[in-house]
Image (spheres, rainbow, N blue to C red):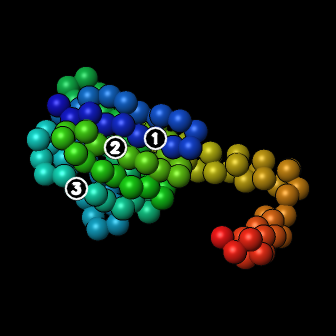
Amino acid sequence: MVKLIVVTPKGELVNDQFQIVVAKGDQGEIGILENRLPIIVKITDGFVKGENDKNTVYIAVSKGILDNVNSVVTVVAEEACIGDSLEEAKTNLDEQRKAISLLNKKSKINYVEAEKDLAKHIKDSKA
């Protein structure tokens, strides 16, 4: 069995055992079975799927890294959503993005100005 752990800034999304983990990264799809060689995969916009006898879980991933060491597959992602199908996971991710965008608009924070101020302060501090 392969342990799949998916973590986002909001916390742990998945922590379960699967017979196979399939991921679509920047270089294509890869299947990971138990006791395979270590690998690191960049996932800009892709997915991770965990399959076992009981269920199949799909996770839509945006801006992430997959790491496989000793049959533990760890995915650290900026954004990720789970679903019973790939389409459902992608829909959930789109809805999450819309909600975040709406919250950002309501907060009235000018991120461009904040980023410029941060860059100026870093330069001034000579860090």
Identify the residue at image location x=21%, y=35%: 2
**What secondary structure is marked by label 3?**
strand
Q: Is residue 116 left or right of residue 73?
A: right
Residue underneath mark 3 = 39
Looking at the image, do the residues carrying marks 1 and 2 touch, with CB atoms under 8 Å apart?
Answer: yes
Nearer the observer, 4 or 23 = 4
Q: Amino acid at mark 1?
A: Val
User: x, y percentage for residue 21?
Assistant: 24, 43
Label 3: how many Cα within 10 Å (few below 14, some 14–19, many 20+): few
Disc 3/disc 1 C-alpha distance (Å) = 18 Å
Residue underneath mark 2 = 74
Looking at the image, do the residues carrying marks 3 and 2 touch, with CB atoms under 8 Å apart?
Answer: no
**What secondary structure is marked by label 1?**
strand
Q: Is residue 70 visible?
A: yes
Label 1: how many Cα within 10 Å (few below 14, some 14–19, many 20+): some
Q: Earlier in the sequence, mark 3 or mark 1?
A: 1
Q: Which numbered circle lies on residue 7?
A: 1
Q: Earlier in the sequence, mark 3 or mark 2?
A: 3
Q: Is residue 112 visible?
A: no
Identify the residue at image location x=36%, y=37%: 5
User: x, y percentage for residue 101?
Assistant: 73, 53
Give above or below for 122 relative to 49: below
Label 2: how many Cα within 10 Å (few below 14, some 14–19, many 20+): some
Identify the residue at image location x=36%, y=62%: 42
**Most distant residue in the top direction:** 54
Q: Earlier in the sequence, mark 1 or mark 2?
A: 1
Disc 3/disc 2 C-alpha distance (Å) = 11 Å
